[in-house]
Image (cartoon, rainbow, N blue to C red):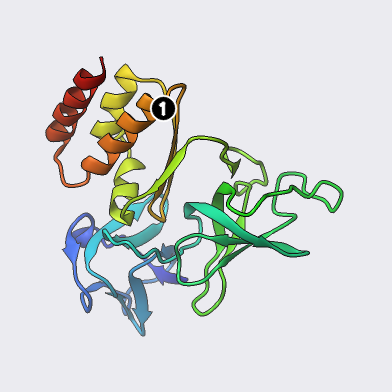
Amino acid sequence: MEVKVSSSPTTFIDKIVVPGDVVLDLSNLTNQTIKLGGGLRQDCDSISVMRAGKLKFSKPNKYWVESSQKRYVPSVEDTVLGIVVDSKADNFLVDIKGPAIAFLPVLAFEGGTRRNIPKFEVGSLLYVRVVKANPGMNPELSCTDASGKAAEFGLLKDGYMFETSTGLSRMLLSSPTCPVLEALGKQLSFEIAVGLNGRVWVNAATPSTVVVVSNAIINSESLSGVQQKIMVEKLLQRIM
């Protein structure tokens, strides 16, 4: 969804908003395109809030409401972890924790052709990008970035996947690196993939490292940055 505005609604960015709040008046604004993510909608000349949370901004022009919830509402350009539940002639059917099963076209891969269609078993875990997310329709996914390259997308082998709230997932993907991942990364070697749909995948050389990293992430949601670092230190002391 796109609307025309002339300036950024900076007054509300990173502040708590609730359903019904009007964060932007469009009546006198023109000439700049912005994109609306989850939690926002356009009502005539105003942009209003549909769910409680923090109003967030991502350069160059995207706004959304960030909230901590179990249910995931797909939005275009979200990166998510999906589980293959079935395959058809033209699509893989993928569970992304949304209100409807998502479609992953069999050609939505770098260099994808009918001769090199990948084979995924039911239960395979994929790191994918949402490319279509219209209300009342099944979302569409891709295993490429915007330029058509595979980048980091695709099958996640081995490792351990667990589910969290969408708020924790966004915290893990924040920049600069969130304290819990920064503290873990200084002491341990591991791989991680985080989906905005509240799924996290962790892989490491030893099961004990996977357990420590997973537990630290799960326990970090309600902690401050300093508390996250202290919690990680205590967990590491137990295994070293």
Give above or below for 23 relative to 214: below
User: Furthest-top residue in view?
Assistant: 240
157 relative position to 52: left or right: right
User: Furthest-right residue in view?
Assistant: 115
Residue 48 sits in which quadrant? Answer: bottom left
> Is residue 174 among what the camera can see?
no
Give above or below for 45 relative to 90: below
| Residue at x 22%, y 46% (from the top left corner) | 221
> Is residue 188 among what the camera can see?
yes
15 relative position to 68: left or right: left
The spot of residue 213 in percent (x, y) is 33, 31
Give above or below for 39 relative to 131: below
Residue 5 sits in which quadrant? Answer: bottom left
* Secondary-structure class at tag 1: helix
Closer-to-camera residue (40/180): 180
State the residue position of label 1.
Answer: 207
The spot of residue 107 in percent (x, y) is 75, 55
Residue 70 sits in which quadrant? Answer: bottom left
182 relative position to 124: left or right: left
The spot of residue 174 in percent (x, y) is 32, 42
| Residue at x 19%, y 18% (from the top left corner) | 237
Closer-to-camera residue (10/154): 154
The spot of residue 45 in percent (x, y) is 34, 81
Q: Residues within 10 Å of mark 1 (few under 14, many from 20)?
A: few
86 relative position to 240: left or right: right
Closer-to-camera residue (4/162): 162
Give the residue type at disc 1. Answer: Pro
| Residue at x 33%, y 41% (from the top left corner) | 172
| Residue at x 50%, y 55% (from the top left corner) | 77
